[in-house]
Amino acid sequence: MSDFHGPQGPFDIPDVPNYIPRRLKPWLFILFVLIVQFSGGVYLAAASDMVGTTGLMQEDILMAGYAMLVGMSINFAVMFRLKFRFSNRVGLLICGAALIAANFICATTSSVVVLVITCFFAGWFRMWATFVCNSTIQLWLTPVRDMAIFFCYVYLVVDSAIQLSGIFTVYTAFFWQWEYMQWIMIGLLALMMIMVMIFVRPVKGPLQIPLLGIDWIGAGLWSVFMLCFTFICVYGNYFDWWEAREIRGAVLLGLVCVGINLWRARFLHHPYISFTALTNRNVVRASIIYLVFFTLLGTEHVFEHSYAEAVLGFDETNMIDLNWYVFAGILAGTAFTYFTFALHRWRYRTMTSIGFFLAAIYLAYFYFMIDYGVEKEMLFIPLFARGAASVIISIVYLTSILQGGMHFFVFPQALTINGFTGAVLGATFGPAVIGELLRHCMAKNAAFIGSAVTDTSGLLSTHTLPELYGMVQVQALVVSMKEIYGWLLVASIIALLIILLGYGPVRPNVIFPKWRTIRKLVRSSVRPLMTLRGMRQAQN
């Protein structure tokens, strides 16, 4: 066990010259990771402005944004190989240049295909740069390599950056134009690259391990499957689901890709995602929890914007100010998880129950309080609870995957599954289901309210037909949202009871191996391929 954990000497980063004080070196990489996390291909907070100027649909912008999440998720399976192939300096320079190109393309193109492909690769390089920075300062954050502590930091940075970048994007578009966000990020990324060239030396490991033995075909097939799943969820309502040839084609293509990957995983020595990762008990449990939990919170993407805009009459700046409430919840949720789960080892069942309880508070508040006269400050409690619940569940179940007892080579594959189910599936499946429920409820309630309005001669004499139609639609929206919030509240309570009645004595105990140990494992797995390549080169 001495090879896997234990206090080290004073923390230092050999990549950074010694004329920079040792205490400031980790903060340099935190600055880098914040710049990378703020950058992206498209910024979903500016979707309405992009729709008005580019001729794209709302679904097109969402598809591009979620394609970036797919690119980030698919990178997990090779991120350790990239770290052992390239130095920190080279990795950050490559990622900085790629993200600059992605921002420039997304600011100038109006092609959906180009936008989606660009955002996919932007997500890939964004994840690579994030891993370079976070892995460099891991021992500074937790000298004993406790991953429960480390993941608290990871989600604090990632989730906070999502909320803050949304606020920054909307105010940038409000005072200037939405493209200025891309230009600002290009400038910050260029500044990061200059700082990397000045302050980060090209320190190489004892052996640069080549990118051999990676199932790139499997990576491509899994990426297409994830993109097809995202396409179905995003465009399903627009194309009327199975009535459209586009949706049926996406379903067929996705099934073919996942079928080929499962078939190849039976005989490949190193498949991109193995059956061991797919069938691991902790991975399956985390995927189910994510599916249920983020479906319950899917109202975030469907209801909150419509309610704030159509019912409460908020403009974009007032709506984006609500992100501060979510940000406060993320800070509180991360601090709570750090002190209870990471330090005092509260059980997984306890933390899961707290997360679902906060989700129930979020749903109950909107169910009982949704109305026309709600002030912005009154939304603090539900949005705070949602932010705290999301970060608690994410930290707890990412930690549980590493505690699943799988081989270290399988762990990055499990992270890919976790990234897809936690980010992509969580952001698309729940809103798709709730959006379809809203459409049916709206039609039913609008017909009922409309029939009551037409029977009231007083309203017909004092309002025009367009005014009455608008009143009916707003009233139907409020009634429909209240109805769906009620059903989701019942589902959250049932899920909470199932969790409370379950037996779960396991506590977090996740220690990351030393980097030299991981390097030896990777090198031993690649050595036969390196030998084979050398023999082929000698023959030629």
Image (spheres, rainbow, N blue to C red):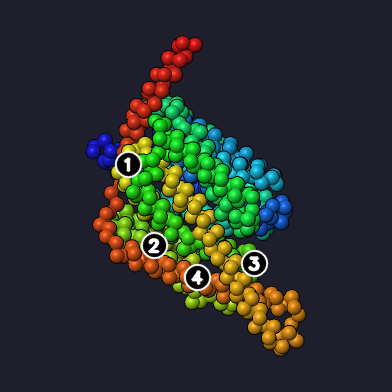
The residue pinned by badge 1 equals 406
The residue pinned by badge 3 equals 315
3D distance between C-alphas at marks 4 and 3: 24 Å
3D distance between C-alphas at marks 1 and 2: 26 Å
Quadrant for residue 293, please give it.
bottom left
Residue sitting at x 43%, y 70%:
490
Q: x%, y% of residue 58?
A: 65, 56
3D distance between C-alphas at marks 2 and 4: 17 Å
Q: Amino acid at mark 1?
A: Met
Sequence order check, earlier mark of 1 and 4: 1
3D distance between C-alphas at marks 3 and 2: 31 Å
> Are discs 1 and 2 less than 8 Å apart at CB?
no
Residue sitting at x 45%, y 27%:
212
Sequence order check, earlier mark of 1 and 2: 2
The residue pinned by badge 4 equals 485
3D distance between C-alphas at marks 1 and 4: 39 Å
Say whether residue 517 is visible. Answer: yes
Q: Quadrant of the N terminus?
A: top left
Q: How many other residues sit within 10 Å of disc 1, few (<14), some (14-19) or many (≥20)?
A: some
**Observer-nearest residue: 41 or 220?**
220
Sequence order check, earlier mark of 4 and 3: 3
Q: How many other residues sit within 10 Å of disc 2, few (<14), some (14-19) or many (≥20)?
A: many
Residue sitting at x 53%, y 63%:
434
Quadrant for residue 51, please give it.
bottom right
Kind of element beneath mark 2: helix
Left or right position of 465 against 397 = right
> Are discs 3 and 2 less than 8 Å apart at CB?
no
The residue pinned by badge 2 equals 355
Kind of element beneath mark 4: helix
Q: Amino acid at mark 2?
A: Gly
